[in-house]
Image (tube, rainbow, N blue to C red):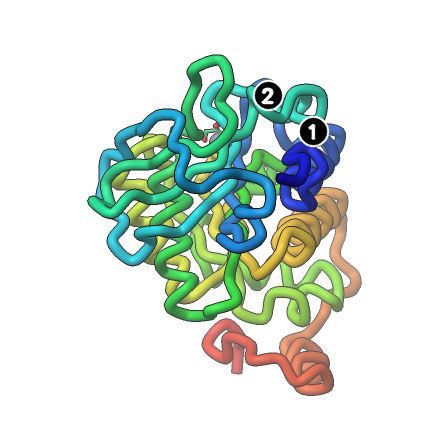
Amino acid sequence: MKNIFEAPFVQEMMRTTANMYRLGWDERNGGNISYMLDEKEVGEYLDLTKVIRTIPLGFQAQSLVGKIFIVTGTGKYFKNVEYDPETNLGIIRIAKDATTAELLWGYKDGGKFTSELPAHLMTHMTRLRKDPDHRVVMHCHPTNTLAMNQVIELDDRTFTRALWKTCTECIVVFPDGIGVLPWMVCGTNEIGEATAEKMEDYRLVIWGMHGIYGSGKDMDETFGLIETVEKAAQLYLLAAGLPRVNTIRDEELVAVAERFEVDYRKDFINA
Ligand code: 2HA
Ligand code: ZN
């Protein structure tokens, strides 16, 4: 067996959580990541017949039966993951009953997965239907994106357009736009279902006055989506309240989207 601490997927979780912590997106126990792994690859590091313990999911994850995920732990701090991955992360497999997680590694102190697992797994189910290469769901509390929540209508079209117009690359990076949920109680199946429903149309979803969800085919893509939104939100806030002289016009949004051949939300463009 190879050393699990050297596994690329464990290393990637360590690097990413540390990076996000230092960007100020994951104060205290804020944020969570889940990453669907390849069974064959995990099998090089762990005996897949050995289940440490089982943990109830609290919902049905039928289409994910047998799938393996590395997931940040509940109550755990992103800043600590790189120093003690085996306590702060866990590797789980969705059991045959679709309502139980089998712990294969981690949560060494008796802990369990993030309280936001419903939103993560429901998002994985939705995104995998849209894109078989989908792998990563990431949640965090980026500062400028959250500040922007306080000064703009919480609506998909309004929020997307405001971001698109801050800098030229936005419509190229997230041509599908950004979904926005109203304020809701977090950690519930209800917010999980609402998130997954938005993920039918978007790879990015704002939780009003709470944070953001990103999904993608790998850690870089998912991180890059959130990073681009956060940069755009910072630009939006830096210019907010100042006299407006320039903006990116709608025909310019269309021109850049067409130049990069991205499938953008046509209904988010003003005719
Ligand atoms: O896990 O961010 O939404 C901590 C959170 C809850
Ligand atoms: Zn959160």
The residue drawn where x is 49% and y is 22% is 107
Q: Amino acid at mark 2?
A: Tyr
Q: Nearer the viewer, residue 183 or 19?
A: 19
Q: Amino acid at mark 1?
A: Tyr
Which residue bears the numbered disc 2? 77
Quarter of the image where the N terminus is located: top right
Near mark 1 (Cα within 10 A), the count class, few <14, some 14-19 or many ≥20, is: many
Q: Quadrant of residue 120?
A: top left
Q: Is residue 22 above or below residue 153?
A: above
- The tally of labels here is 2
Residue 86, numbered label: none
The residue drawn where x is 74% and y is 57% is 244
Query: Is 44 situated left or right of 62 in this image?
Result: right
Q: Is residue 37 above or below residue 72?
A: below
User: SS class of the residue under badge 2?
Assistant: loop
- Residue 207 in the image: state x and y as whole percent: 44, 42
Q: Nearer the viewer, residue 24 or 265?
A: 24
Near mark 2 (Cα within 10 A), the count class, few <14, some 14-19 or many ≥20, is: many
Marks 2,1: beta carbons within 8 A: yes
Residue farthest toward the front in the current orientation of the protein: 1
- Of mark 2 and mark 1, the one earlier in the sequence is 1
The residue drawn where x is 33% and y is 53% is 64
User: SS class of the residue under badge 1?
Assistant: helix
Q: Quadrant of residue 15?
A: top right
Residue farthest toward the top in the current orientation of the protein: 109
Q: Nearer the viewer, residue 2 or 97?
A: 2
- Residue 36 in the image: state x and y as whole percent: 50, 51
Calculate the distance from the C-alpha at mark 2 to the C-alpha at mark 1.
9 Å
Residue farthest toward the right in the current orientation of the protein: 245
Which residue bears the numbered disc 1? 21
- Residue 165 in the image: state x and y as whole percent: 67, 64
